[in-house]
Image (cartoon, rainbow, N blue to C red):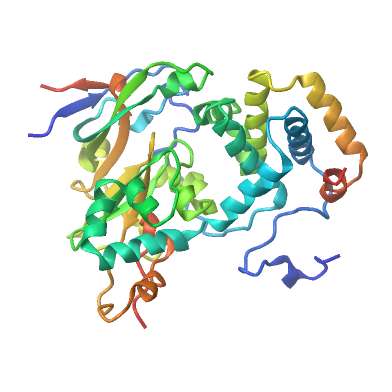
Amino acid sequence: MAERVRVRTRMPPGHVRAPAYLRGKTGEIERPLGAFGNPEEQAYGRFGDMRALYRVRFTMAEIWGDSAERPEDTLDAEIYEHWLERVE
Amino acid sequence: MTDGRRWHDMGGQDAGPVDLDQHDFALWEKRVDALQVITSTKGLFTVDGLRRVLEDMGEASFETMTYYERWVASVNQNLVEAGVYTLEELGARMEEVKSRGATYGEAAGG
Amino acid sequence: MPHDHHHEHLSPSGHPYRPDDDVPLTYWQTMEIAMRELLIEKGVTTAAEIAQQIGAMDARSPADGAAVVARAWVDPDFKARLMADGSAACREMGFEPGALRLLVVENTADTHNVVVCTLCSCYPRNLLGLPPDWYKSRAYRARTVKEPRKVLAEFGVELPDDITVRVHDSTADMRYLVLPARPAGSDGLDEAALAALVTRDSMIGTGLPRPPE
């Protein structure tokens, strides 16, 4: 059973790498990718701490609802851990 | 944007057909690309620093400037922020470059 | 002047030249020259290093990726290594994919993969060379995640409904290479002949390999 996660709905200004169209959407972790520098710190000239990065797979039905082109098609994106919350 | 989505965050927005025309890169564009790779590889800024300035330049820049025009603006901004050179040095040098001739070839040859 | 006639505005590859040496100097070109000179004077880089970097980038092309794909088609062990660690497998072949990790996604009889970067224009440039203009366009970035089948149709790729499309939004530290399915009728071809079937777009997912002659 793959782990289910939801992308946080936060909307801070500034440089973040979680796309707006995925915020609030639920998907499954496709694979963990390891830890990488936090882009939200690196963008402003600070090294920041390392953050775990995951590939998360969403169905087009989850993202686009009734306007999905084909509901079973999927979208994978790389999302940092601080943008994800576990879905029970 | 009232919902907080920023202009560069384009996924899912309405847009027209994909234009498949392509162009080759000019020497000055290749130089901008090379300077970006070299200066970021040497740790003067990160690719996220490059993106941050491109994003902060706003949507108008995306519509009115070419790709490498935007890149040279962002690389420059990051180098100034990193203290590699000052605006005074840049401004004076740009004046001198302009005085060398009316074309890129003449100005770059100095 | 080399650019007097209309047809001479096309490069050998058939694309229009960008304004360059013989057109009026722009503000941004002036900035590039000034920046480059200051970086050299301050010892950050050298003219030789810049020329070397331009040469290295010019040398990269979709042919590099095509060689990787063809190897994966003929060598199942290599393919397994490529799927497990794309960067390491490319280094085996002498290609340096760079600091960002290459992740390979495989097209099969029931799955078609396509790559986009909605936030900017992330692309496996160290393996395939610089991205095509359309990859950086608003239309491609905006639409591919919502209506990939319509976008693919504009590239001439019509996918039947029983094929699942997997879109990959290159949002962070991975770079993506699509491993296209080996074309039918290519059984007798050697690795070099197979590589010649692999197009740039087939490795982005907006195209398919050429059919064998």
Q: Of all residues shown, which one is farthest toward the left?
A: A1
Q: Residue at x 72, y 47 (%)?
A: B28
Q: Is residue C131 at least partly visible in the picture?
A: yes
When the figure is inspected, residue C81 is found, relative to residue C192, above or below; the finding is above
Q: For the C terminus of chain C, which image quadrant?
A: bottom left
When the figure is inspected, residue C120 is found, relative to residue B2, above or below; the finding is below
Q: For the N terminus of chain C, which image quadrant?
A: bottom right
Residue C131: image x %, image y %? 51, 51
- Left/right placement of residue B79 relative to residue C175 reads right
Residue B9: image x %, image y %? 44, 32
Q: Residue at x 61, y 40 (%)?
A: B63
Q: Nearer the viewer, residue C77 or B107?
A: C77
Q: Nearer the viewer, residue C195 or C29?
A: C195
Q: Residue at x 52, y 56 (%)?
A: C60
- Left/right placement of residue C126 relative to residue C206 reads right
Residue C23: image x %, image y %? 82, 52
Q: Is residue C153 at least partly visible in the picture?
A: no
- Left/right placement of residue C71 relative to residue C41 reads left
- Left/right placement of residue B92 relative to residue C66 reads right
Q: Quadrant of residue C112?
A: bottom left
Residue B1: image x %, image y %? 47, 24
Q: Nearer the viewer, residue B47 or C112?
A: B47
When the figure is inspected, residue B22 is found, relative to residue A66, above or below; the finding is below
